[in-house]
Image (cartoon, grey):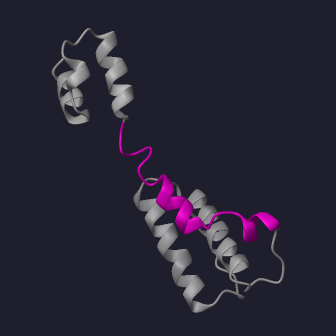
Amino acid sequence: MPRQSWSEKRERQYEHIKEGLTDRGRDEATAEEIAARTVNKERARSGESEQASRTSTDDISSGRRGGLRSHAGAGGRTRDQLYAEARSKGIDGRSTMTKAELEQALDDR
């Protein structure tokens, strides 16, 4: 999916993003699409593309957005979610437990 107008740097960026996505379980087609969109957005932000939408240039950068979201999802449930589950299961002492202790108490059940 790399384009002729992409520089060598953008080609490497595309391959790196695509590889990372496939390593995390995304299918090949989805990984290619996300990687191409990310590279094209970065090209637009840096003035490398002929056309650019306002959201591409004014929105938060892809790298920053990914960094903000990196602790969501795969990191597991939040402490509040664990606490709610512990409350529903009647686990005593849950209010003073840390996230790790809540996870352990729920695993023991």
| 57 within the magenta span | yes
* Rendered location of residue 74, percent (x, y): 39, 46
Q: Is residue 55 above or below residue 93?
A: below
* Rendered location of residue 14, percent (x, y): 56, 75
Q: Which quadrant of the rendered structure holds the C terminus?
A: top left
| 103 within the magenta span | no
The residue depicted at 31 percent of the width and 13 percent of the height is 87
- Displayed quadrant of residue 31: bottom right
* Rendered location of residue 11, percent (x, y): 57, 83
The residue depicted at 51 percent of the width and 60 percent of the height is 66
Q: Is residue 104 above or below residue 8?
A: above
Q: Give the camera-side residue of 40 and 70.
A: 70
Q: Is residue 90 above or below residue 47?
A: above
Q: Is residue 23 above or below residue 41?
A: above
Total number of numbered labels?
Answer: 0
Q: Which quadrant of the rendered structure holds the N terminus?
A: bottom right
Residue numbers of the magenta segment: 54-76
**Extreme front residue here?**
96
The residue depicted at 70 percent of the width and 87 percent of the height is 4
- Displayed quadrant of residue 106: top left
**Extreme bottom residue here?**
8
- Displayed quadrant of residue 85: top left
The residue depicted at 17 percent of the width and 29 percent of the height is 104
